[in-house]
């Protein structure tokens, strides 16, 4: 299979997409990437990968890539991911995440692509009444980001019912860390992910880290989240691809997390521990819509796929993020 087909990775020059590209290459798949480089970086894509600078909404370009590269499956990471921005600019999110996904899915169907792996999110659950969250937890998003992703899940369900096409939607929890070999990592300026922000602060790139809310119903009063190493997440995508090919009638909608959570203060303690420094913490007000705790029940993905996370350790996640942040400084000449 790997000798004959190529996998198209949308957003493959971005954070999670670039890790998926490496995971595919490490498993002997041929890969092509489309990325408009709005938030991605050309240098994040290995030289041996066919790269197309363009937009997934450009149906003529996508059709050409499918034909030229003999695309068998699409891994779709392209999109916008900042929750507060989605509240301020909902039309951007419904365009980038929903309308463009619709165009990409149509291109896939018309091009005869049979398999589709979608980068979804735990934000589709909104503020769940239970934690850990199962796949059966009601999906009640509270912001346009979560809703834009949920709309794409629904599109995939409907298209799969109407065409010879199956899909896997992986609902990510809090993605963090970087490639253990420091080949790629979170590189976007102004990122909002806690571990990224904290290692920037540890390296003097920020003066402090804001802690949003200290009165949550959690052991230390700060929000608890399920942090998953990006390389373990990328490995799950490769297993999803193999599962879709093996069972073309089967779809998968699965949580992707470790099933345990850490509070904001526990994460900052881990960064202090790894760096042997003390980050300046600024206690701030809660952000609207942040749940007390958001942890995955990952029983379904563990049962469905032979997924064995290799990096389910907070200090390891921080160590890899820190190593990448240092390398990123060298790349940028900082």
Image (tube, rainbow, N blue to C red):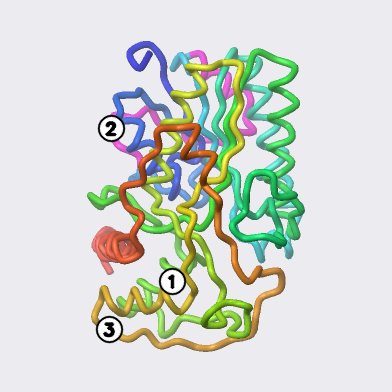
Rendered residue at 45%/32% (across/down): 305
Work out whether 326 lies above or below 59: below
* In front of the other: 17 or 173: 173
Q: Position of residue 5 (x, y in %)?
A: 41, 15
Q: Position of residue 132 (x, y in %)?
A: 59, 57
Rendered residue at 62%/48% (across/down): 134
Residue 197 is tagged as 1
Q: Which residue is mark 3?
A: 277
**Helix or strand or loop: what does disc 2 sit on?**
helix
Asked whether the beta carbons under mark 2 and mark 3 sit within 8 Å of each other, the answer is no
Quarter occupied by residue 278? bottom left
Q: Earlier in the sequence, mark 2 or mark 3?
A: 2
Q: In whole angstroms, how far apart are the C-alphas of marks 3 and 1?
A: 15 Å
**Helix or strand or loop: what does disc 1 sit on?**
helix
Q: In whole angstroms, how far apart are the C-alphas of marks 2 and 3?
A: 35 Å
Q: In the rendered structure, does residue 65 fall within the stretch colored magenta?
A: yes
Label 1 neighbour load within 10 Å: few <14, some 14-19, many 20+ = some
Q: In whole angstroms, how far apart are the C-alphas of marks 2 and 1?
A: 29 Å
- Taking 228 as reference, is 329 left or right? left
Q: In the rendered structure, does residue 66 fall within the stretch colored magenta?
A: yes
Q: What range of the chain is rendered magenta?
A: 45-67
Label 2 neighbour load within 10 Å: few <14, some 14-19, many 20+ = few
* In front of the other: 255 or 49: 255
């Amino acid at each position: 299979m790997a000798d004959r087909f190529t996998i198209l990775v949308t957003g493959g020059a971005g954070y999670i997409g670039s890790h998926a590209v490496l995971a595919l290459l490490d498993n002997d798949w041929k890969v092509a990437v489309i990325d408009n480089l709005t938030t991605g970086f050309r240098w994040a894509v290995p030289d041996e990968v066919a790269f197309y600078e363009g937009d997934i909404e450009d149906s003529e370009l996508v059709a050409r890539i499918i034909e030229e590269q003999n695309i068998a499956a699409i891994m779709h990471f392209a999109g916008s991911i900042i929750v507060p921005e989605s509240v301020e600019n909902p039309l951007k999110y419904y365009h980038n995440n929903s309308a463009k996904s619709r165009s990409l899915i149509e291109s896939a169907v018309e091009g005869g692509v049979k398999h589709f792996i979608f980068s979804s999110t735990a934000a589709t659950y909104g503020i769940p009444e239970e934690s850990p969250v199962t796949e059966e937890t009601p999906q009640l998003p509270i912001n346009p980001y979560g809703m834009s992703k949920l709309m794409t899940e629904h599109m995939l369900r409907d298209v799969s019912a109407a065409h010879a096409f199956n899909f896997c939607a992986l609902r990510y929890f809090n993605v963090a860390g970087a490639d253990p070999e420091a080949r790629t990592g979170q590189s976007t300026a102004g990122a909002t992910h806690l571990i990224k922000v904290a290692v920037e602060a540890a390296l003097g790139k920020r003066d402090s880290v804001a802690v949003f809310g200290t009165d949550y119903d959690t052991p230390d009063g700060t929000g608890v989240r399920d942090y998953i190493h990006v390389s373990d997440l990328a490995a799950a995508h490769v297993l999803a691809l193999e599962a879709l090919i093996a069972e073309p009638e089967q779809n998968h909608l699965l949580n992707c997390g470790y099933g345990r959570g850490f509070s904001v203060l526990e994460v900052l303690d881990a960064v202090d521990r790894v760096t042997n420094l003390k980050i300046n913490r600024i206690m701030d007000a809660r952000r609207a819509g942040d749940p007390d705790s958001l942890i995955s029940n990952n029983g379904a993905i563990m049962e469905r796929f032979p997924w064995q996370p290799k990096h389910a350790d907070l200090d390891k996640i921080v160590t890899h993020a820190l190593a990448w942040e240092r390398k990123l400084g060298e790349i940028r000449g900082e």
